[in-house]
Image (cartoon, rainbow, N blue to C red):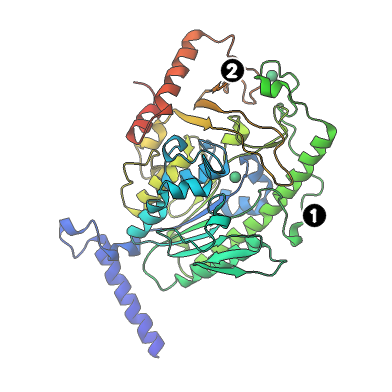
Amino acid sequence: MAARTIARIGRVLLLFAVCLGLGFFLPQGEKERGSTEAANRPNIIFVLTDDLDAASVSKVPALEEYMADQGTTFDNAFVTYPLCCPSRATILTGQYPHNHLVRGNAPPIGGYKTFRDLGRERSTLATWLDDAGYETALFGKYLNGYGKLGRHHVPAGWDEWYAPVGATQVNQNGKVVTYEADTYLDDALSGLAQDFVRRQERKDAPFFVYLSVHAPHAPATPALRYEDLYEHLRAPRTPSFDEADVSDKPGWIRGLSLDPAEEKRIDEFYRKRLATLAAVGEMIGGLLRTLEETGKLDNTYVVLTSDNGYHMGQHRLGLGKQTAYEEDIRVPLIIRGPGVPAGVSRDEMVLNNDFDPTFLDLAGVPPPDSVDGRSFASLLDKMRSNDPASRRTAFEVRNWGSQKDKTPYRAVTSVPPYQAVRTQRYLYVEYESKEHELYDLRKDPYELHNLYDSADRDLITELDGRLDELRDCAGQGCRAAENAPP
Ligand SMILES: [Ca+2]
Ligand SMILES: [Ca+2]
């Protein structure tokens, strides 16, 4: 009886809060802010995979069922530096790496240490959403090198924090918890995230979950129950796989060859990667059920993406990332949520710079001037139009230097530093060695024919100009440089 009365009072209060949020009782000037408004704002669950290439998603039935069939797929989602730590720093700041200055996975140019030492933790997506009244929680990988340096550290803006600091150790809100040796960490994170979502049931504040799983990153150990799921699959033999003629390519590619042992390693790793994703699909299914049971499903966006793509045999490259080729810069991006059209795909260029302004837009707060990206929230809603997101026609891709990977399926090739511009039609790469690559993606989607030597010089001048505008851009200047030239 008492419980029912409390529930009724709760409902009346909620209705009151909703009315306040809609501005029924407030004079015009007071409608902008106020914690009661929070009741209407959507929850966001951001699922960040590690090293997932865009092409692999369709091989995982659960990801198709829970995400692609129920949401909108962005066919042209990219990252601006296809490497873990720089991309994650971009996701936390909304900036190009040339502005946040985390330019690698390890110090002195990158890693968690650089992010921390530059003071970046003071102003991130977490602090902005927290300031806007969101309940914020991180589950999973934070930034490379955090485990050693940040063992007990919880960065500003996070109300709850569950970040691995060892193989079976998790910093849980500042306290290191050691799990059983046979714990499958992505499952543990899944359980912690579900528990968090369940605890939001009676709260009016909206929540933001940053769920950063290990899958399908090397060593790509699948959960035991999914070990043999993809026994007979081989990595796709695209036309660029073990590229037949690399005489058009820069020196670092011309020296490569794929031997049968490497091809075997690629196929084995491909199967293991897909098998790790089965647990991610299961995790998303579990979260969706929890949202439904707690009445939050209709007001929650679920976003699935990756910090970078991955190449597996293309252009004679073995396993790895960090190149400007499509396999590395393209990432999966699928979003489901209130009003988001189901089972459709869109072709606007969307970047990892854009998550912050988009989530802030959904939360009803403007992004800081430091943000380089732009909101694509209008693309999630067929009722909104005239969106700035569709005006982007180019972006910068950049790699500052090679980082050796020490994992069992390590990259065998070092990718030399380059600056590049990817337009809707072309990829143009300028290496520190002064070698160049130019591909017409409309005619040559697999990037088999480097046109740099034969191309019209006016085209080269135009692409050089766009790269020049992008390489030092900041904030609104980036958005202007990315838009079609007037
Ligand atoms: Ca990664
Ligand atoms: Ca070729």
Q: Is residue 209 above or below residue 64?
A: below
The residue nearer to you, when weighing 253 against 248, is: 253
Please state if 376 lies on the left or on the right of 254 as rendered.
left
Q: Residues within 10 Å of mark 2 (few under 14, many from 20)?
A: few
Q: Residue at x 73, y 36 (%)?
A: 236
Q: Amino acid at mark 1?
A: Asp
Residue 47 is at least partly visible in this image: yes
- Check the image and report above or below for 68 versus 393: below
The image quadrant where one finds ligand 2 is top right
Q: Amino acid at mark 2?
A: Glu
Residue 277 % position (x, y): 66, 52
Q: Is residue 343 left or right of residue 184?
A: left
Image quarter where the N terminus lies is: bottom left
Q: Quadrant of residue 6?
A: bottom left
Name the residue tied to disc 1. Answer: 228
Furthest-front residue in view?
108
The residue where tag 2 is placed is: 435
Disc 1: CA contacts within 10 A as few (<14), some (14-19) or many (>=20): few
**Residue 140: quarter of image:** bottom right
Q: Secondary structure at mark 1?
A: loop
Q: Nearer the viewer, residue 34 or 16?
A: 34
| Mark closer to the observer (2, 1) | 2
Outermost residue toward the bottom in this view: 1
Residue at position x 68%, y 63% in the image = 184
Q: Which mark is residue 479?
A: none
